[in-house]
Image (cartoon, helix red, strand yellow):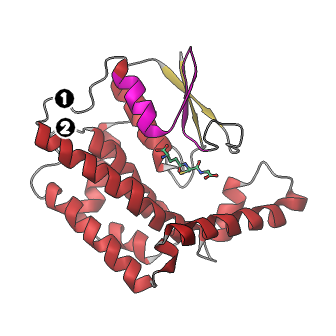
Amino acid sequence: MLTLLTYPSAFGLFSASPFCVKSAFMLRQSGQAWRRSDMLDPRKMPHQKLPVLRTPERLVPDSDMIRTWLEQQGADFDKGLTDIQKAQSRTLVRTAEEHLYFHIVLDRWGNDEVWPILRETFFTGIPALIRKPVSSSIRKAVLKGINSQGIGRFSLPERLDRVERDLEAISAHLWQSPFLMGDQPTSADMSVGPMLAAMRATPVDTPLTQRIKQDTLLNSYVDRVEEALPLT
Ligand SMILES: N[C@@H](CCC(=O)N[C@@H](CS)C(=O)NCC(=O)O)C(=O)O
């Protein structure tokens, strides 16, 4: 049986990591038998990140590589899509994973109100006595990474403007159909849906959580993806 090595559920989500949720959606849609195995420390994993799929032969890191592996076994997450739709799907996936994701990271890790909740959710494996100093140094490293990536250098209004433009692009698809590429969920929904769900689920109200919660189209879209691809 396949095993998805994933961060545990948090904030009402299958996992705090949208990439873990994406992989779970893909496993579900592939029809393969699978189970989850939760972990908090990814340092022994091939990319020191999660998700990772344990197959009978090897560990497959990275949600995109998990997708490719499942496709090699016969899964088709974009059944019936034209080449142009597949190309549009790819750009939406990259928009979510390589841009929106970093705004979520900053919203979670850079916010002093969210931080104590994060610390007690993500670092429960660390003994209480040393949890604060250890988790603080990890927090510093994450924020340094966001600064190197570039998102951390924008002001809040600039960040919100960047997010807004992506959300407009996503919404343009949803004015026309219940899912990004039509009437059924496809690979784009399995990436974008979890990303917007994560944006909405940050456990303190922020401009980003509010942005999704107050948008009828996007809010109902996130619910629709979760209902179409139940993970329990
Ligand atoms: N490109 C990877 C991204 C995975 C990823 O960024 N995972 C994060 C959690 S959302 C992680 O494990 N971070 C741990 C670290 O960077 O130390 C994928 O698609 O799976």
* Residues in magenta, as a range: 49-71
Report if residue 64 lies within the magenta region: yes
Q: Is mark 1 within 8 Å of ligand 1?
A: no
Residue 120 lies in quadrant:
bottom right
Q: Which residue is mark 2?
A: 184
- Residue 66 on image: x %, y %: 45, 31
Query: Which residue sits at x=19%, y=40%?
Result: 86
Residue 109 located left or right of residue 126: left
Residue 216 lies in quadrant:
bottom left
User: Is 27 located above or below residue 45 in the figure?
Assistant: above
Judging depth in this view, the residue of 103 and 61 nearest the camera is 61
- Residue 202 on image: x %, y %: 51, 64
Q: Which residue is mark 1?
A: 79
Q: Is residue 174 visible to the viewer in this orientation of the structure?
A: yes
Q: Are marks 2 and 1 in contact (CB under 8 Å)?
A: yes
- Count neighbours of disc 1 (C-alpha within 10 A) and say few if under 14, some if 14 to 19, many if 20 or more: few
Q: Residue furthest front?
A: 148
Dot 1: element: loop
Query: Which residue sits at x=26%, y=52%?
Result: 91
Dot 2: element: loop
Q: Give the spatial CA distance, label 2 vs label 1.
A: 9 Å
Report if residue 56 lies within the magenta region: yes
Judging depth in this view, the residue of 84 and 9 nearest the camera is 84
- Residue 113 on image: x %, y %: 62, 76
User: Is 87 located above or below residue 66 in the figure?
Assistant: below
Q: Amino acid at mark 2?
A: Gln
Residue 170 lies in quadrant:
bottom left
User: Is 156 located above or below residue 167 in the figure?
Assistant: below
Mark on residue 47? none
Query: Which residue sits at x=81%, y=66%?
Result: 132
